[in-house]
Each structure stands twice: as C-alpha cells, then as structure tokens.
Image: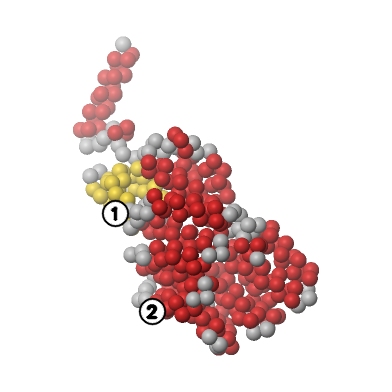
Amino acid sequence: MMTHRFGTVLAIATSALCWLGLEPLEAQERDRVYPVKGAAVTGKIVERNRDRVVIEVRGNNQNFPSNEVLRILYEGEPPTLSRTKDLVAQGQFEQSVEEFKKIDAASLPSEDMKQDYQFLRGYIAGTLAIKGKGDPKNALTLMTNWVKDNAQSYQFYPAAELMGDLAVAAGTPDQAAKYYGGLAAAPFPELKTKGNFLQGKALMASKQNADAKSKFQAVMEAKLSDPVSLKYQKMARIGIIQCDALEGKANEAIGDLEKMVDEGDSTDGELFAELFNTLGSLFAASGRNEEAVLSYLKTDQLYGAQSEPHAEALYRLTQLWTKMGSSQRAADAKQKLEKLYPTSPWVRK
C-alpha cells in the first residue's frame, strides 16, 4: 500500500512540474559553465571548440568565448574531479595535487571528463614545474600529448601558453616560440597580444633578435584598449629596449628603463620584476655590478611572488656576489634559490 501511495505522489508531482513548464530534476541537464565574470550557467553543453562554448538553457543557447570560461562541470561528474577543477581555478595548485590523486580515472563516466582529467594531469604538473617544483620536460610531454588529441578543446589556449613556458624552462626557447604561436593565433586581442609578446621573448632567448623585435613592435603597434593588452604593450617596450641594448645602445636602454620605473605602477609585480631583471642584466653587461645587484635585489625583496623572474634574480645574485667577493651572500642566495625552486632550470645552470 505504501509503495502504491508513493508512486501516486511521485506521478502527481511529476505532472505538476510538467504543467508548470518545468522538467523533473532527474530529467534536467546539469552541465555547468563558470565564466570568468558573472554567475555560473546551468544547462546542456551543445558545442565546445577552442574559440567558444555553447550551453543550452531552457531551449535557448548561450555563447561564451573560450577565453572567458573559467571551468566546466559536467552532469554526473565525481566530486573529486569537480574539487580539483575548483582548486586549479583558484590557483591552489599544491592543494589540487592531493585532490587529483583521489580521482578514479578508470571510472569516469564520459569522454568529456576523461579529457578534462588528462588536461588537469598535465596542467597541474606543468604549472608546478614552472614554479620550480617539478620536471618541465615531463610536464611538457604530458601537455603536448594532450594537445595532439584535443587540439580543438576550449582549453587549447592555456595549454599552448603553458607548453611555451615549459619549453623555455626546459631550455628550448626556439620550440617555445612555436608553441606561443598557438596563443598568438587566437581571435581574442588580449591572447594575441600576449602570444606575440611571449614569442618575442622566446626568440630573443634564441638570439633571433631581429625576429624578436618584430614581434615586440607588432604588439606596440596594435590598436588595443583592454588592461591586459595595454600591460603587454609595456612589456613589449621592455623587449624592444633590450634589443636596442644588444645593438650597442646600452646607455640609452638603461635610461629608458629607469624612466619606465619612475613612471610605472609599482604594484604591477609582473611588469616591475621584468623591469628590474632587465636593468640588472644591462648593468651587469656594462660592468656596473653594484647597480646590477641592487636591481636584482628589488626583484628578490619586492616581487618574490613572481616565481620565474624571482628564480632568475637569485641566480644572478649568486653570480654577481661571487664575482664581487661576497661568498657568504652568494651562498645565501644559492641556498634560497634551491629551497624555493628546487627543480628550476636556474638551479641547474
């Protein structure tokens, strides 16, 4: 009798939902898109490619450019996978490692989830490697294998950027320039700008200065207004100044950089770490070792949150203090480098 009553109540409830124009909960699609800005949107993912994500909500499609999608959660996704995505989106990579280990990859119920699992595997490993806490070559292999199978994924652009960063860390900047090309080919101005800038940096590290300067100039000449692109135009200006210094204009280059320091926003850690490291390299190349030390110390003391330039600054300080006869300071800088960034390429130099 109880079973009959429960069935009757359930049928009435279902009929009522349909009468109101709603589907019962178990019949609803529960994919969820989390945009970079704004509230999450729940519905059914009907399209995903490297440029956009489309989700159907009550019969209407909502389109999101892929660069504005923070993460996607799929219906039936295990909590361990969802929590790992949340931690990665929040930048908590060390914590994400432990959560990732809890995912039972073999039991993931869809190809979408398996694809995300493999992406997270490479992305977490790669990001930690860039921070000096992992092997960049191993992480690069994971990411390149993922891209081969998922070249049209909405996560392609972050993968391309990370592959470039890992190639730089692995000591192959010429390869990095090719990976950054995927970012530079994006239809989104801020990604295109960043990609061209990073290509310029990689080409300069490969001693292809003319090509590097061309990339930096392309960034400078672009008609842009968004804050991210404007920042990379400033970074590209630093790159052009470095190229000028390599062409025999070191004194003018130092003056230009010092002017940028005076006029810039010192709360922009990425920009100022780049400025002080570049100044340090030009002072050192000119034999002005004390001024070089002061520049690298500013990166060390003020912009240590910028892991890659911070590791470089510590390495350069080790070299400079050794050259200047300050063996204890050199040892302290080396110890700090090895402790903070144990697998960084700067440790192995």
Q: Secondary structure at mark 1?
A: strand
For the point 41% across and 53% down, which residue is it? 147
Quadrant of the drawing holding the N terminus: top left
Asked whether the viewer can see residue 253, the reply is no
For the point 25% across and 36% down, which residue is it? 22
The image position of residue 48, as x and y in percent, is: 32, 51
Q: Could you tell me the amino acid type at mark 2?
A: Glu
The image position of residue 173, as x and y in percent, is: 51, 67
Quadrant of the drawing holding the C terminus: bottom right
Residue in the foreground of this view, choosing between 343 and 227: 343
Above or below: residue 47 compared with residue 217: above
- Left/right placement of residue 11 relative to residue 345 reads left
Q: Residue furthest top?
A: 1
The image position of residue 18, as x and y in percent, is: 22, 33
The image position of residue 311, as x and y in percent, is: 63, 65
For the point 48% across and 59% down, which residue is it? 162
Check disc 1: other Cα within 10 Å, few if <14, some if 14-19, many if 20+.
few
Residue in the foreground of this view, choosing between 61 and 162: 162
Q: Could you tell me the amino acid type at mark 1?
A: Asn
Q: Secondary structure at mark 2?
A: helix
Residue 63 got which mark? 1
State the residue position of label 2: 221
- Upstream in sequence: badge 1 or badge 2: 1
For the point 59% across and 67% down, which residue is it? 309
Asked whether the viewer can see residue 292, the reply is yes
Q: CA distance from mark 1 to mark 2?
A: 30 Å
- Left/right placement of residue 56 relative to residue 92 reads left
